[in-house]
Image: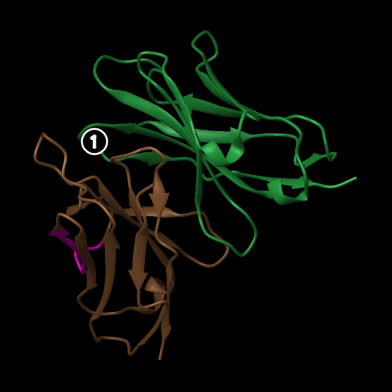
Amino acid sequence: QLQLQESGPGLVNPSETLSLICDVSGGSLTSSGFYYWAWIRQPPGKGLEWIGSIYHDGTIHHNPSFKSRVAISVDTSNNQVSLQLSSVSAADTALYLCSKRTLLQPPVWGRGTRVTVSS
Amino acid sequence: DIVMTQSPVSLSVTPGEPASISCRSSQSLLFSNGYHYLDWYLQKPGQSPQLLIYLGSNRASGVPDRFSGSGSGTDFTLKINTMEAEDVGVYYCMQALHNPLTFGGGTKVDIK
């Protein structure tokens, strides 16, 4: 059974780059057919917000609200999906979650990792 | 962007009674394969969101059968047949058909 586990620094200084990892276990990072890996976040006390996705063919889409601050990649050798968010501010304080989606299988989510942006 | 509108914003339900949450999308969520890319999630207090329903009406593994999803096109409903204390939390709908993926604002459900 596919399991996802996010991890990160917990605390990041303003203006720096946030780097997060989603460890994939119980299955391969790559597979046949359509799928994508997505990053989603939830600021404290607020709703859910999609950050971006990387697709089976390497295509990347990100939420325009993040402008060019987002970078998403996959590391097949370590079975990981990565998120980098640059020039962070207090507004980026949130629970960050990764997810895998295929066409017909139930989407799988990790439990998330909390990130606080503060000096 | 597809706007997801949930109602009501909050709901108090007597244990054993039914509950219903509506989710409307600003565009159809029907894909060419015949499936609707609409999920329902429950976020229990202090926890991360957990999947309840995917593809509009498919119950996720381990989800009690008192939960059901229905709807088509732009109108979807999550129903709880008989409310239990463990069902309290915030319910979110999410569309996974178009980028940016978008979520409803949430419906907070508690026990009356």
Q: Main secondary structure of the magenta part?
A: strand
Please state if B72 lies on the left or on the right of A40 as rendered: left
Q: Amino acid at mark 1?
A: Gln
Would residue A100 be visible to someone looking at this image?
yes
Residue at (37%, 15%) from the top-left corner? A30
In the rendered image, the vertical position of residue A97 relative to residue A72, given as above or below: below
Please state if B102 lies on the left or on the right of A9 as rendered: left
| Percent of width and height locating residue B37 | 24, 45
Count of numbered tags: 1
Residue labelled with disc 1: A105
Tell me which segment is drawn in magenta.
B64-71
In the rendered image, the vertical position of residue B13 relative to residue B99, given as above or below: below
**Chain identifier for the brown-coloured part of the image:** B
In the rendered image, the vertical position of residue A70 relative to residue B77, given as above or below: above
**Residue farthest along the top direction in this orientation:** A77
Task: State the image quarter where residue B105 is shown.
Answer: bottom left
Q: Is residue B11 magenta?
A: no
